[in-house]
Image (tube, grey):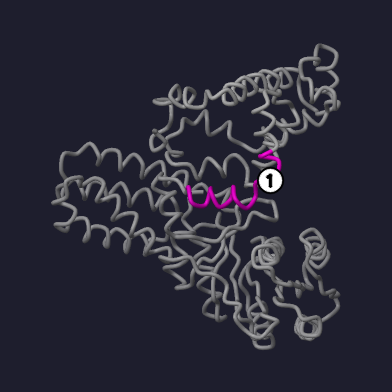
Amino acid sequence: MFENLSERLGRTVKNLRGQGRLTEQNVKDALREVRMALLEADVALPVVKQFIASVQVKALGQEVLGSLSPGQSLIKVVNDELVQIMGEESENLNLSTKPPAVVLMAGLQGSGKTTTTGKLALRLKDKEKRKVMVVSCDVYRPAAIAQLQKLAGDVGVEFFASEPDQKPVDIANAALEHAKKQFIDVLIVDTAGRLAIDEAMMSEIKELNQVLSPVETLFVVDSMTGQDAATTAQAFGEALPLTGVILTKTDGDARGGAALSVRVITGKPIKFIGAGEKMAALEAFHPDRVASRILGMGDVVSLVEEVHEKVDHDKAEKLARKMQKGKNFDMVDLRDQMEQMQSMGGMASLIDKLPGAANLPDAVKNQANDTEVKRTIAIINSMTPQERKFPAVIKGSRKKRIAQGSGVQIQDVNRLMKQHLQMSKMMKKMAKGGMKKMLRGMKGQMPPGMGM
């Protein structure tokens, strides 16, 4: 998310840093570039105009022009304004009501509403320790009810059964009564979507809203629809008392226009962003951290939080002890590391949060894809337990069998063997106290923002 915008703004910022001082002219030149970057990111025109006008007023003030490092001061103004238009602070769900707290999910068909219902249920169960139940009022889309039932089973929350021949309002009433009897903390109601906004859809969801009196009415929208996301959210906001927005498919959105437009146009906060297919891939939306990512400064806080929450610390300690004892870093260890990476949203998600990620060469970014990680895991899974523990035994005929078993070429197996050997040597150096030497050797090769 934001790759294109981040790259364009990065170039503008770099040019400003080369200026001895800022003048009215070079500020205007820089803001012209920023304006083009925002428009290319599919940010809504009214939002772009508001953003540029506000930044220009602040940038031409004496506080920036008279600064010893005017380039840095202007970057701060841009950063603060990005935070401002996205909502300043992260806003959590308001569940402080007599249980069950009802969360109503609204949105168009194809926005990822049902999947997001499952993701939100998992988040509330695991992070907030709530007893959650989900119900589908979508009686129109084939298999919508069965899809939610499967997701509920996958994430370990209760599912209230419904049938396609029932009326959505009757389903909602029955689910609410059942939730009360079962002492459910949160009831999440998935509603029907349409390919476009229509009168029948709005009438139905208004009725559900009246019957359920939800504490949260969340609009789920596909971020890849850009400006249309904000426009659609506005239409729903006029029909429903929306309390927030969830942006989905942000991992496939290189522009980020929706994130920068939704808050201004709807007046409603973005509460979560969905960044992947995995059920754990639902993040709280932090405007300050997102602004930092856009300007290429990374999001180390979110990265640390993810490591704390999602890394298997027992496995990490076990590997550390193993390395200290001088034992080999085998294929099982490598597979564990790959799986841990996937649990944190994948390689691309991790790189996106690193400072200076926007300045990495395209060749590096292109290699940072989850397809390679999945292929590596498949190759390792095709090995025998002995081969995983002692990779040196893997020769010609074994390589051929492993390649066939994982659906890859022998060259791919050879590449993995070479990468594993390099990682194994690096691990041995680290175990012998060579970490400082290694870091010194890497100094100067690190991307901007990651220097030591």
Residue holding disc 1: 312
- Residue located farthest toward the bottom when viewing the structure as drawn: 211
Please state which amino acid type lies under the numbered disc 1.
Asp
The residue positioned 80% from the left and 16% from the top of the image is: 394
Magenta extent: 300-317
Foreground: 390 or 150? 390
Left or right, 10 with respect to 20, comes to: right
Q: Secondary structure at mark 1?
A: loop
Residue 370: percent from the left, percent from the top? Answer: 65, 38
Please report the residue visible at 54 percent of the width from the left and 71 percent of the height from the top: 244
Spot occupied by residue 289 in the image (x, y as percentages of width and height): 45, 55
Q: Magenta stretch: residue 422 in it?
A: no
Q: Is residue 231 left or right of residue 197?
A: left
**In this orientation, which residue lies closer to the viewer: 185 or 349?**
185
Q: Residue at x 65, y 22 (%)?
A: 424
In this rendering, would 401 be left or right of 255? right
Q: Is residue 374 above or below residue 224?
A: above
Q: What's the residue at 52%, 30% (across, down)?
A: 364
Quarter where residue 440 is shown: top left
Q: Quadrant of residue 134?
A: bottom right
Main secondary structure along the magenta-highlighted residues: helix
